[in-house]
Amino acid sequence: MTSSILPYNLRTNKAIDRSIFIEFLIKMNKYQPIDQYTYIGFGATHLEDFKQIHTILGLNKLISIEQDKSIHMRQLFNKPISCIDLRRCSSGEFIQSFDFDENCIIWLDYVSPKQINEQIREFQSVIEKCGIYDIIKVSINSNPDTLGNQSQNEDRDITLQKRLDKLKSRISVFLDEDITSDDMTIQGLPNVLLGALINAANQITRRDDKKFFPVSSFVYTDINHQMLTLTGVLLDKSSDFINDIQLENWKYSFQPDQKIYKINIPDLTLKERLIINSKLPTDTHEEIISELGYQEIPSFEAEVENYVQYYRHFPSFSKVII
């Protein structure tokens, strides 16, 4: 199976990002009950996040947005629980027409890099229409190659400048003034786009009493594209809610000095995973490497370090009799 046709529900890094999102919702639920919230998302064919939101958190008001006719038809056939309202429309049409008069959790899971201006403006519209304690998650493409590939005879600096010019032509109104062409790399672009999303949120909330508080941000690669995610909650500007739920003690919480956490799970065998898991959470990376006998594989320590960061959220795929 090639990565380009890897099923939505089997994308390991995305599955970890989803699991951490649900972990935050569980934390939130202890202080602000969310079982009566409406969950809104882009369910795709498998509606995987809807199944987990319903099963783990007990939400029964679920709305899936899908513009593609063929995917929508498959959703109607594959609908795993009766309480999912399958809407065939664009995200923009839905946001414009939906009242958002009750608390909601909404995940804007975008893919196309060419529509990033429209996507950020939809993100702003959701912030404008949502209320206190509503939770908003957004995913956008952060692959710098979508802004231009380096040709064989082209200088790297020229390629980076072209990327910056293209990004400015799309979302200049949201960008920080101090970004440069050197930021148009696989490491730099996610930080630029994260800043753009936060700027976009602040443009909306500066004129009222609510504020978008970033909760967590991740970058990961699945199916050849690097994705950036940002989760936040709308709160009263004077609220102490973030302190009340003790997010500063959560290992994935948003930190101004380290805004984005990278999910890059290595391709481990079952035997490797079992040995590593048996040493956690107490052993050091060096001890784990020694147990595996991989001291002569220098690159493996970084891979183990990333696995240790997310092992509790690592999905398990297996054959079952249904």
Image (cartoon, rainbow, N blue to C red):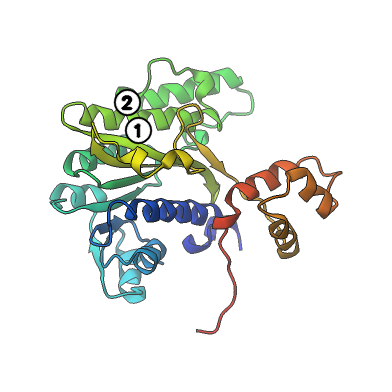
Q: Is residue 45 above or below residue 192?
A: below
Nearest to the observer: residue 50 or residue 277: 277
Q: Which residue is mark 1?
A: 197
Q: Quadrant of the N terminus?
A: bottom right
Say which of marks 1 and 2 sits in front. 1
Q: Quadrant of residue 314?
A: bottom right
Q: Disc 2 residue type?
A: Phe
Query: Callout 1: helix, strand or loop?
Result: helix
| SS category of the residue bearing label 2 | helix
Q: Is residue 225 visible?
A: no
Query: Which class describes the residues within 10 Å of circle 1: few (<14), some (14-19), or many (20+)?
Result: many
**N-term-proximal mark, 1 vs 2:** 2
Residue of label 2: 174
The answer to whether any part of residue 9 appears in the image is yes
Residue visible at 16% across and 54% down in the picture: 102
The single residue placed furthest to the bottom in the displayed view is 321
Residue ID at (52%, 28%): 188
> Percent position (x, y) of residue 278?
72, 60
Tell me if residue 52 comes above or below residue 117 in the rendering: below
Q: Quadrant of residue 79?
A: bottom left
Instruction: Report how far apart the C-alphas of labels 1 and 2 lie in the structure.
Output: 7 Å
Which residue is more in the foreground, 201 or 158? 201
Residue 115 is situated, as x and y percent measured from the top left of the image, at 34, 39
Q: Position of residue 114 (x, y in %)?
A: 37, 38
Residue beneath the point at 24% across and 58% down: 37
